[in-house]
Image (spheres, rainbow, N blue to C red):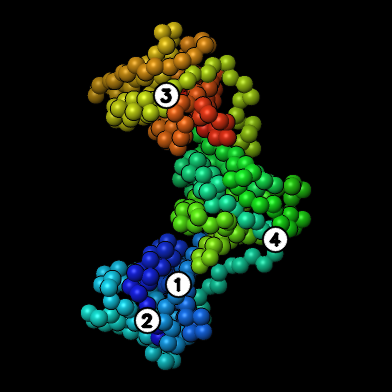
Amino acid sequence: MEIVCQQSDLNIAIQLVNKAVASRPTHPILSNILFTADEVTNKISLTGFDLNLGIQTSFDANVEKSGAITIPSKILSEIVSKLPSESPVTLKVEENTENILLKSDRGSFNLKGIASDDYPKLPFVESGTSLDINPAGFLKALKLTMFSSSNDESKQLLTGVNFKFKDQFLESAATDGHRLSVVLTSEGENFSKLEMINNLNTSDDYLSVTIPTRSLREIEKLVNTKLKEDSIKLFYDKGQVVFISSNQIITTRTLEGNYPNYSQLIPDTFSKVFKFERNLIINSLERIAVLADQQSSVVKININDDNFAAISADAQDIGNAKELLPVSFTCDQIDIAFNVRYLLEGLRVISSENILLKCNLPTTPAVLVPDDNSSFTYLVMPVQVRS
């Protein structure tokens, strides 16, 4: 194999597929990147695959001789990122060996690769369900849900985001057991009609998959670069999801099991609704959080009859803080407490000027919703505070 390419093209491709290279590989070859060169198309393809997440990307280059080899990811990444960007890079594999010569104008590096024969093939979905996703609608769904997923690997199903692809609708949800994000993306900003829906293994007329948040962070980067495209292709079959867009492929296993029935957690009605200006409450909470974070991360919100909410935190043996914030409401007053980080993370993804805090009791779930529409619901459990 022999190729000549631009340093910038090679470096971007390596950094992209690196995200799917195993950090603790069960086999040495999984710490490598698969290089494939085709002299007919003059394209180089790079693949990283840790058996759960796979990323493949390709770019144009001058391919003198076709071939394939796997190269240690870490050392290759460090070398190529430090090569001068203005100088072309030559990569040559000696005939019938795994010896790799990497050259630029400033010098050369000799590396030892592993033959590509044992590199696991990326799973490709040949049947099942396929659909076209609108990049902007899907990106919106990701940004409004991923932050609510769990980091606790013992709650494996909750370490991902659940997607329900319905005809002209996408419902996405994530929860870590303390808070819940649900967003409904509708026709016009979503995706085309489901194809091959009869192949689904459920009696429902929609596709439900839970995708690991770790994989979604890489999918988010892919979608971000494709916002000008009409659609991204998604394929699903037997626990595997594949996203395909022009020169990139991302494949990921789904999380197995039935995602919790989160809709039953959201109260049907609320006796108390409070309206805040979003920027004001975020700024106030960020200041109060300085003290709240010193101990329990708890902030108290006391709303009485004078159209102001008192936001406070008490860090024992350190100090306390209190601010008054304008609020409008036509209901009874309330004294309620929350984890300040959960509140802030939910408020930051809402884009409307005003937000509504809806609740019933200081002990039952509360929700934050944008004032201008109800497509996003953020449920957060209050914290019980001893008087």
| Tag 1 residue | 59
- Secondary-structure class at tag 1: strand
Residue positioned 57% across, 56% down in the render: 230
**Residue 338, quarter of picture:** top left
Amino acid type, label 2 = Val
Give the Cα distance between marks 4 and 1: 29 Å
User: Which numbered dot is residue 4?
Assistant: 2
Q: Residue furthest top?
A: 305
Residue 147 visible somewhere in the drawing: yes
- Relative horizontal placement of residue 11, taking residue 159 as reference (left or right): left
Mark 2 and mark 3 in contact (Cβ < 8 Å)? no
Residue positioned 53% across, 48% down in the render: 136
User: Which numbered dot is residue 277?
Assistant: 3
How many numbered marks have been drawn onto this rendered protein structure? 4
- Number of other residues with Cα within 10 Å of mark 2, as a class: few under 14, some 14 to 19, many 20 or more: many
Residue positioned 28% across, 76% down in the render: 87
Q: Earlier in the sequence, mark 3 or mark 1?
A: 1
- Number of other residues with Cα within 10 Å of mark 3, as a class: few under 14, some 14 to 19, many 20 or more: some
Give the Cα distance between marks 3 and 2: 56 Å
Q: Earlier in the sequence, mark 4 or mark 1?
A: 1
| Tag 4 residue | 128
**In-front residue for pair 233/80:** 233
Residue positioned 53% across, 65% down in the render: 246
Amino acid type, label 4 = Gly
- Secondary-structure class at tag 2: strand
- Secondary-structure class at tag 4: loop
Mark 2 and mark 1 in contact (Cβ < 8 Å)? no
Amino acid type, label 1 = Phe
Mark 1 and mark 3 in contact (Cβ < 8 Å)? no
